[in-house]
Image (spheres, rainbow, N blue to C red):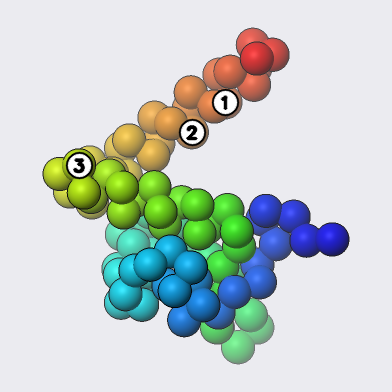
Amino acid sequence: MPTDSSALFAISVAAELAELPIQNLRVYERRGLLAPARTPGGTRLYSQADIVLLRRIAALLTQGLNLAGIRRVLELEREVDRLRARLGG
């Protein structure tokens, strides 16, 4: 059974699932907001976790943040998750 981090989706499917243009996914990758898996031939493969992240990015954009701000928010959210895990809750 695939996990949330299993890379399953081609870029066209990921864009459709996230309701974003394909070009946006490429931009977000170039800006370091996400890092999809790659096949040996270089094809991007997205996981369910990547789709969730893409939706989070879209939500932050609608709130008025730019990509640099979104990167910082995502970094802080990951840090909060790490600290919660360390504290056991």
Are the residues tagged 2 and 1 within 8 Å (C-beta)?
Answer: yes
Quarter location, residue 6: bottom right
Q: Which mark is residue 63?
A: 3
> In the image, what residue type sits under mark 2?
Arg
Q: Find the distance from the CA under tag 3 to the CA under tag 2.
A: 19 Å
Cα distance between the residues tagged 2 and 1:
6 Å
Q: Residue at x 58, y 53 (%)?
A: 49
Residue under label 1: 82
Callout in the foreground (1, 3)? 3
Relative height, residue 80 to residue 4 (above, below): above
Percent coordinates x, y for residue 65 in the rendering:
18, 43
What residue is shown with label 2? 78
Residue 11 makes an appearance in the image: no
Q: Position of residue 86 (x, y in %)?
A: 65, 17
Q: Amino acid at mark 3?
A: Gln
Whichever of labels 3 and 2 marks the residue nearer the N terminus, that label is 3
User: How many residues crowd mark 1 within 10 Å: few (<14), some (14–19), many (20+)?
Assistant: few
Mark 1 residue element? helix
- Alpha carbons under labels 1 and 3: distance apart: 25 Å
